[in-house]
Every structure is written in C-alpha cells, then in structure tokens.
Amino acid sequence: MSIRDIVILPDPVLKEVCAPVAAVDDEVRALLDDMLETMYDAPGIGLAAIQIGIKKRIVVIDVSKDEDEKAPICLINPEITWTSEDTSTYEEGCLSIPEYYEEVERPAACKVTFLDRDGKEQALDCDGLLATCVQHEIDHLNGVLFIDHISRLKRDRVIKKFAKAAKRGEMPEFKSRRGNEPATERPLAE
Ligand SMILES: [Zn+2]
C-alpha cells in the first residue's frame, strides 16, 4: 500500500470523464487499498480515483465518525439509480480544492448500485452525509467538482485563486471554516 499524490485544482485532469472498470481484479484491489490509505492520510472521508490521476470509475468513502471503527465503502462503476425530491445542504470541501468550503444543495437521499471489491453487484441506500458524499464522489467520475454547483462568481474566484497559487508553486490561503460540521471529503477533526 502507498499514499498517492492528490491532484489539485486547476489540473485539467479533474475535468475528465472516467472509464468503467472492465474487471475487478487484484490490480483494482491494490488501487482501492492505495486510495483508502491516501484518503485516511489526508485526512478525508471520500476520494475518487481521478483525484490521484487515474481515470477509472472507482470511489472510496468512509463517513464513520469513530477513528477506531473504520467503515470503508469501495464503489466500482457506481451508478445513482434514484434521488429524493427532498434536498439538504452541506458545507462541502474537496481534497483537490484544499481549505475551500462552500454550501451545496443536493438531493437529501439517493440509491446507488456498484460493484464491490469482490466484483459483486451491490446496492446502497444513502442519506445524510453519506448521500452528499456519494453524489460528490460520483460527480468526480464525470469531471464535475462541487464548485460547479455554486455560483459562477464564487467558482471563478476560487479557480483564479488556485491558478495564481499554482503558478507560484504554493497553495492558496482561505479564511478558516465558519462552522464545525463535517464537510464532504473532510472529517470533523482536521
Ligand atoms: Zn472532491
């Protein structure tokens, strides 16, 4: 297992659409292990393969709050089959857009089908933070970032800030988070 480098905005790879996994083999399982290690190290609660530069439809998530009881979920070729009409708003963050948080409204619940690490078909009913996180991660597989769900003005400002910082070889600085609620891809304790 190894910790991989996370791709940061405005890297154009984040806009690419990922390809389905043809077969869940040992190579895919090794990738899942690296993704989990990278996510826990960040620390984060979700990571898509494209965020480490691999254009495959693979996602790992762990929204469990207890450090000692990890509950990793591995989603291969995930597909959202249903979303609720009810919406909820979470302050989202992204490991590829470090230290930037903004509220995003999404369906409050969803159903997702996927292949697990044994290649078996599975279905999962999601609500709360998990529903938001699943939608955030599956967006990544389609080249969509959470900032694509906020106002154009705010989005342009963030992209500009990251582009400028990247030129200087730095990370942009943002004001500290307002709330203490967990944000997607970022657990409560940072
Ligand atoms: Zn993200």
Image: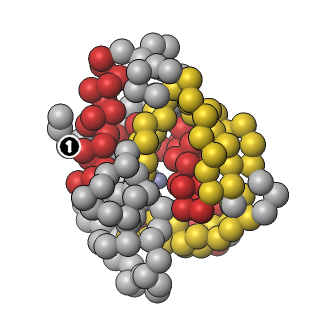
Q: Is residue 160 visible?
A: no
Image quadrant occupied by the C terminus = bottom left
* Callout 1 amino acid: Ile
Specify the color scheme: secondary structure
Q: Position of residue 92 (x, y in %)?
A: 52, 66
Q: Position of residue 151 (x, y in %)?
A: 67, 69
Which of 155 and 176 lies nearest the eye of the viewer? 176
Which of 43 and 157 lies nearest the eye of the viewer? 43
Q: Position of residue 90 (x, y in %)?
A: 58, 70
Q: Residue at x 46, y 86 (%)?
A: 178
Q: Residue at x 20, y 43 (%)?
A: 3
Label 1: element kind: loop
- Left or right, 33 with respect to 129, comes to left
Residue farthest to the right, as pictured: 85
Residue at which label 1 appears: 3
Q: Quadrant of residue 138?
A: top right
Residue farthest to the left, as pictured: 2
